[in-house]
Each structure stands twice: as C-alpha cells, then as structure tokens.
Amino acid sequence: MSDHRQYAPATLRNRDFILDVLREVLPTKGDILEIASGSGEHVVHFAKSLPSLVFQPSDPDPNALQSVVAWVKATRVTNVRAPIILDASQSPWPIASADGVMCINMVHISPWDVTLGLIKGAAAILPPGAPFYLYGPYRRAGLETAPSNHAFDRSLRNRNPAWGLRDLEAVAAMAQSVGFSIPIITEMPANNLSVVFRRM
C-alpha cells in the first residue's frame, strides 16, 4: 500500500501545473479514473476546472475515501463520483472501463508490484487512444538526477525498502509491453515529471 498522503502538500502546490498538462491530454468528455486519490483535494480541483469530465476517485485506504467524500461535499462539485476502494496491484479492478487513467505521486511510494499492477490495470480498461497519466519524480538514464531527488530517494528507502524513485525507462518498457505508446514527458516544478502514455 502506498503512503502518498504524507507528500500531499507538494502535490497541492503543483496542482495548477498538473492541470495545465491534463487540459492538453485528457479527452473533452468521458470518465477519468484516478488511482490513489488520497485526501481528494486535487481531484475536486481538477473537477471544478474540467466540468465536462466525470472523475472516479479511488484509493485502497478507507480513511482516504472518507476524506474524498468530505472534499466533494465541501466544494459541491457535481462531476466527481463516490470514491471506490481500489488496490492497483489487485486484478481485476472494480471498474470495467474508463476514458482516461491518472495517478499522481504513487509510483515512488509503493512497492514495484503496485506499479506493475497499475500499468496492467490501466491497459485492461482503456480504449485505443486513451491517455494514461503519471506524475511524480523519476530517475532517467543518461540524465543527472537532481540532488534533492537523490536525498528524497534515500529518505523513501529508509522509510520502506520497497519504495523509491523508479527508472522511467523501466516504467515505459513495462507500459509498452502491454500495449501503450512511448511516453510524452513534460518537465514539471520541483524535479517532477508528467508522463503520458496512450493506449495503442
């Protein structure tokens, strides 16, 4: 299980930068599944800004689902569905299809088998051309990782040896092996990346 909530403030600071990318890559209409929604603060922000889409939040933690419900109620957004329990590593997922899948700040704070499950699960429910969006810090072959990311990686592995920054090339290779395109990568603030795959 991931522990993404403890890193939520950084995501919240960057949510408008994420939104700018989402505007470009998400469809104009349809259902968007969010994996590892955490508190729900960012999904309601995206929902308010993208009213033609319907967002389906999910999380493996029942406490997170309660927080999502509270945020939806407080903000009165009408295009966010009731959150569902979903562990990305468990197949099949409790949702049959979506027009897009997004996952923010989970890959580095969960075991590698969760990322594998995330990629396979997204491939199973997305139609051709649909986007699969990832956000967070990664290692990239041939490019020097920022010192802050080195330190962050060490702190993650000290917390849990199964966590840590993943090699983007390994993530991309896995995604391509189950029918995704090569990724489109956008550099984001604080040494994060937006990584967008398309279902082939």
Image (cartoon, rainbow, N blue to C red):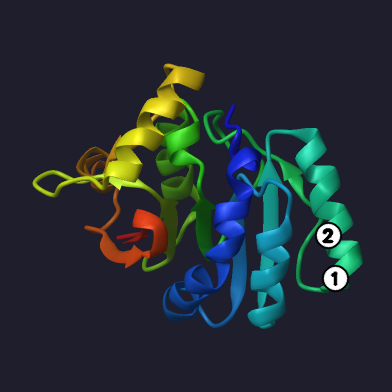
Q: Can residue 106 be seen in this view?
A: yes
**Residue 194 sits in quarter:** bottom left
Q: Do the residues labelled 2 and 1 touch (CB within 8 Å)?
A: yes
Image quadrant holding the C terminus, namely: bottom left
Residue 136, placed above or below residue 128: above
**Which residue is disc 1 drawn over?**
75
How far from the left and from the top, in percent, is residue 130? 42, 66
Residue shown at the point (64%, 71%) measured from the top left = 46
What secondary structure is found at the residue carrying circle 2? helix
The residue indicated by pointer 2 is 71
Query: Along the line of sight, which residue is nearer the eye, 187 or 96?
Result: 187
List x then y, in percent, for residue 70.
Answer: 88, 55
Q: Which amino acid does label 1 sit on?
A: Thr
Q: Which mark is residue 95?
A: none
Determine whether, in the image, residue 24 is placed left or right of residue 180. right
| Mark 2 surroundings: few (<14), some (14-19) or many (≥20) residues within 10 A | some
- Where's the N terminus, which quadrant? top right
Image point (8%, 46%), residue name = 142
Task: Out of 154 and 71, give the one closest to the viewer.
Answer: 154
- Image quarter for residue 92? top right
Residue drawn at x 54%, y 31% is 91
Q: Residues within 10 Å of mark 1 (few under 14, many from 20)?
A: few
* Residue 96 appearing in the image: no
Considering the numbered disc 1 on the image, is that residue within a helix, a strand or a loop?
helix
Q: Please name the residue shown 22% across and 58% down the image.
A: 182
Left or right: residue 163 compared with residue 62: left
149 left or right of 139?
A: right
- How many labels, in total? 2
Residue 30 picture location, percent across and down: 60, 73
Q: Where is residue 87 in the image (x, y as percent from the top left)?
A: 61, 33
Q: Distance between the residues labelled 2 and 1?
A: 6 Å
Q: What residue type is labelled 2?
A: Trp
